Each structure stands twice: as C-alpha cells, then as structure tokens.
Amino acid sequence: MNSRFTIVVATAVAVILLALAVPNLGPVLRAARADGTWGTFTASRLSCVVHPGNHEVCSWYGTFAAVRGSREVSLYGSARETMAAGQAVRAVDVGRPLQVYPPGGSNEWIFTSGLLLVAVALLYPLVSRLWRRPEPAQQVSDEGGGVGEGQAEESPVGDETGDQIGQQP
C-alpha cells in the first residue's frame, strides 16, 4: 500500500511532467513528420556551448523565410560542421516560435513520449487508491446466536453464594 506522502509526491511530479510534455505534443509530432510550412533557413551565426568533459554543442541561428514572411530562428539539429555562415537550406516551420527543422524532421517525440509514460506511471498510486473498493463492513445479525447491533450478550452472573441469578432451580 502506498503512503499518502508517496501519492502526493508522485502526483506532483506527474503533473509537472505532464505540464512539460502535453503542450509539446503537437509540435514534436509535426516535427517528427516534417509537417508544417516549408521555407528556407539561411545561417548567419553559430552559437556553441562547451559542457564539462570538453563536449561541445553548437546551433546555427539565422533567418527562416517562407510565404508568410521571415523571422530569426535556430535550426534544430544543426552543428558546427553541418553549415557555414550564409548557407541556405530547406527547412520546415512546425509552429515553434524560435526553431525550425530540417527536411528529415526530428526525434524529439521520443523524449516527449518518455515524459508522458513516466507521468502516467507516477499517477498509478493515485489511481489505484481512488479505484480501490472499500472492504465491506463486518455485519453480524441477530439470527444464529450472534450479537446484533446495540445489543449486549447476556452472561450468567452469580450472587455471593455462587447461585446463578435469574435461573430457576
């Protein structure tokens, strides 16, 4: 059986994970299929971050131009070696305000699906507690010699001489 604390913590974490995953479902599914407004991404600057262990992660920023106009964005999955400043590539806008995707789409749906699965698993203690049926109350009837509700069982009481009171000789 899960404690109330476990249920509260698991539910709180599940709600946070759902708040992160659910709003991203549409964009990650569209990005996985490269489904959106097609246009051209023109690289203008490279931004890199070096993580501990000297691991470098870079992204290209530039202009995405489509029929509806242009805006400054980053290209998902771009790295130092994938482009050069001024280079233009085909890209798709799936509805994220600051990011566009290459024609192959993305695998972001895997991480988002993982978040959803963990959130559902964390809701299990709450759901199992809510769906658990209460055990039926023990009922004893007057029939069959049992003690009914509000009745006390009579026991023979003796007087000082040891004779049973209420019994006839």
Image: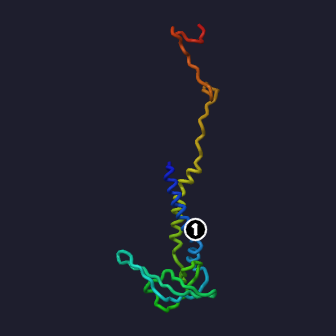
Helix, strand or loop under label 1: helix
Q: How many marks?
A: 1
> In x, y percent, where is residue 122?
52, 58
> Is residue 83 positioned above or below 10 on the image?
below
> Is residue 30 positioned above or below 81 on the image?
above
Q: Please, what is the three-letter code of the amino acid marked with disc 1?
A: Val
> For this rendering, which residue is in front, 47 or 146?
47
> In x, y percent, where is residue 94?
59, 79
> For this rendering, which residue is in front, 128 or 21?
21
Give the residue at x 36% y 74%. Answer: 52
Q: Residue furthest front?
A: 72
Q: Which residue is mark 1?
A: 22
Label 1 CA crowd tier, 10 Å (few <14, some 14–19, many 20+):
few
> Is residue 91 positioned above or below 132 on the image?
below
> In x, y percent, where is residue 12?
52, 59
Q: Residue furthest bottom?
A: 86
> Is residue 155 positioned above or below 13 on the image?
above
Q: Quadrant of the C terminus?
A: top right
* Quadrant of the rendered image containing residue 157: top right
